[in-house]
Amino acid sequence: MTAEEFRSQLDERIADAESIIKSFLPKEEGYQKLILEAMNYSVLAGGKRLRPIFMKESAKLFGDMKLLSPFMAAIEMIHTYSLVHDDLPAMDNDELRRGRKTTWKVYGEDQGILAGDGLLNFSMETALKAYESAENLEDHVRIAKALQVLYKKSGVYGMVGGQCVDVYLEGAKTPMDMDTLMFIHKNKTAALIEASMMVGAILAGADDGAVAKIEKCAYNIGIAFQIRDDILDVIGTGEELGKPIGSDAGNEKQTYVDIKGIDESEKDVEAMSKEATEILESLPGDHEFLKELILSLVDRRK
C-alpha cells in the first residue's frame, strides 16, 4: 500500500466514523439544551476518530458488523468526556484544544463538568442501542461482553485509574519507577485502544483466544504510541507537535524517555509495533490497512 493509498483509505474511514458518531448525538432541545450543546460541541471538535476506526477494523477481521455502530459512537463519547475533564482548571487548565476554545472556556467550568458527565452517561445509552439490532441470544451475549469490556477499560480499573495515578504523582520529587509509569501508560493511554479493538472483535464473533490476542496487540499499540509521544516531546518541534516542546518537563512529568533514554525508547517502540503487527498476521481477515495504521501512529512526527 502506497502512502497516498493509505491516506485516502484513512480519510474514508474518518468520514465513515464521523457520520456514525453524528447520527447518535442528542438533539439540542428542552430545558437541558445548554448541556446538550456543550456535549455536541465537545464531540464535534474534530480529531482522527482512531478509536472507532480501530473498533471497526478489528470487527472486519471476524466478519459480523451489525452490532457495531452504537459502540463506535459510544467509545468516542467516552474518549471525548475524558478530554473535556482533562482540560478543566482543576486538571490541566487548558483553554485550547485542536485550535479552538475548550468546552469549559465556552460554557463555563460548571457546564464543562456536566458535559463530561453527560457524555459518559450518554455513551451507555448509546451503546445499549446495539440491542435493537440483536437477532438472537448469541448477539445478546456478545453485547453484554462488549459492555463489560468497554466500561471496565474506561473506568477505575482502566483509563480513570491511570489518570488518577498520573495526576496524583504530577510534580512528585521522588523519581518514578518503571512499574508505576507503565501502570499509568497501560491504563491512561492503552486501555481505550484495548477496549476499541476488543469490543470490535467481540461484537463480530471472535472467540476468547482471538480476543486475548487482540488485547495484547492493542496494548502494544497504546504503549508504543505513548512512548512515541514522550520521544516527540523531547526531539519534536513546536510546529510539528502543535504545542511547546518539552511540555512534559515543564509540567514536572516524568516520562519513559527520562527513565530509559531516547535510544532505548526508540528500540522499544520498534519492538512493540513489530509484535503488534505479528499478532495481527496470526489472525484471520485482511490486516493491511490496520498494520499501516499502526505504523503511521508509532512512526509519526506529531
Image (cartoon, rainbow, N blue to C red):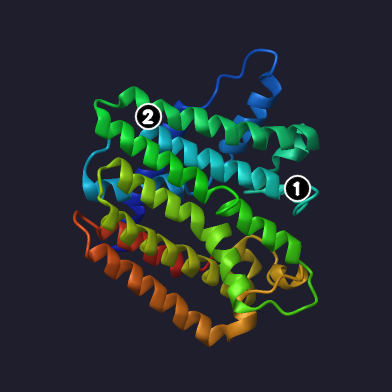
User: What is the three-letter code of the residue carrying label 1?
Assistant: Glu
User: What is the three-letter code of the residue carrying label 2?
Assistant: Ala
Pointer 2 or 1: first along the chain: 1
Query: The residue tagged with tag 1: helix, strand or loop?
Result: loop
Residue 300 percent location from the top left of the image: 47, 67
- Quarter of the image where the C terminus is located: bottom right
Question: Can you see residue 108?
Answer: no
**Total of numbered circles in the picture?**
2
Q: Is residue 110 left or right of residue 277?
A: right
Local packing at callout 1 (Cα closer than 10 Å; few below 14, some 14-19, many 20+) is some
The CA distance from mark 2 to mark 1 is 35 Å
Choose top left, top right, bottom left or bottom right for residue 200: top left
* In the depicted structure, whether residue 18 falls above or below residue 91: above
Residue 247 percent location from the top left of the image: 71, 67
Contact between marks 2 and 1 (CB within 8 A): the answer is no
Q: Which residue is mark 1?
A: 95
The residue drawn where x is 58% and y is 66% is 183
Local packing at callout 2 (Cα closer than 10 Å; few below 14, some 14-19, many 20+) is some
Q: Is residue 112 left or right of residue 270?
A: right
Question: Can you see residue 29?
Answer: yes
The residue drawn where x is 47% and y is 69% is 224
Choose top left, top right, bottom left or bottom right for residue 175: bottom right
**Which of pointers 2 and 1 indicates the residue nearer the eye?**
2
Residue 234 percent location from the top left of the image: 63, 76
- Quarter of the image where the N terminus is located: bottom left
The residue drawn where x is 32% and y is 31% is 140
Along the viewing direction, whichever of 173 and 209 lies nearer the viewer: 209
Q: Which residue is mark 2?
A: 130
Picture disc at residue 21: none
The residue drawn where x is 68% and y is 70% is 245
Along the viewing direction, whichever of 84 and 145 lies nearer the viewer: 145
